[in-house]
Image (tube, grey):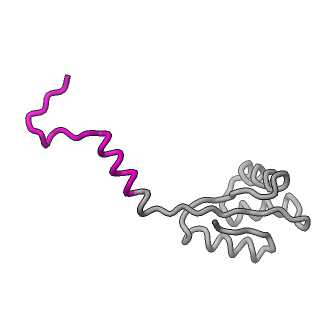
Amino acid sequence: MIFYNNIKDYEDPKRKYEEDVLVLDETDDVYKLILHNDDIHTFDYVIDALISVCKHDLEQAEQCTMLVHYKGKCTVKTGSLDLLKPMHEKLISLTLTSEIV
């Protein structure tokens, strides 16, 4: 059993957690960079683009490419709009189809 000498020494962990979650919800907008399938580019081209633009490792890029091929689209990166916008623009410049949601 823990005894506290002063009420200030006691902090309710549940309350602290709830406060942290509220702060994250208010300040951290999470966006998704979604890559769409097309009938133009090869698997290798898309894999190389994801490694170069999104900083994926080979395995992650291959998995995303397979998901794009079979499902029609895949979230390739999540984060702030400031992080994703340059990646989106680079993918577009490589003639890939992407969007930020």
6 sits left or right of 40 in the view: left
Report the residue that reaches farthest toward the left.
Answer: 5
- Dominant secondary structure of the magenta stretch? helix
Q: Nearer the viewer, residue 101 or 4?
A: 101
Q: Residue, x 75% and y 74% (percent of image)? A: 92
Q: Residue, x 86% and y 65% (percent of image)? A: 38
Query: Residue 49's spot in the image, x, y percent?
Result: 76, 65
Report the residue that reaches farthest toward the top.
Answer: 1
Q: Residue, x 46% and y 62% (percent of image)? A: 28
- The quarter in which the C terminus is drawn is bottom right
In reply to whether residue 14 is colored magenta, the answer given is yes
20 sits left or right of 63 in the view: left
- Up/down of 10 relative to 55, above or below: above
Give the quadrant of residue 74: bottom right
Give the quadrant of residue 25: bottom left
- Up/down of 48 relative to 94, above or below: above
Query: Residue 7's spot in the image, x, y percent?
Result: 12, 39
Query: Residue 80's spot in the image, x, y percent?
Result: 54, 66
3 sits left or right of 22 in the view: left
Q: Which residues are magenta?
A: 1-23
Please count the marks in the image: 0
Q: Residue, x 77% and y 58% (percent of image)? A: 73
53 sits left or right of 41 in the view: left
Report the residue that reaches farthest toward the right.
Answer: 39
- The quarter in which the N terminus is drawn is top left
Query: Residue 86's spot in the image, x, y percent?
Result: 63, 74
In reply to whether residue 52 is colored magenta, the answer given is no
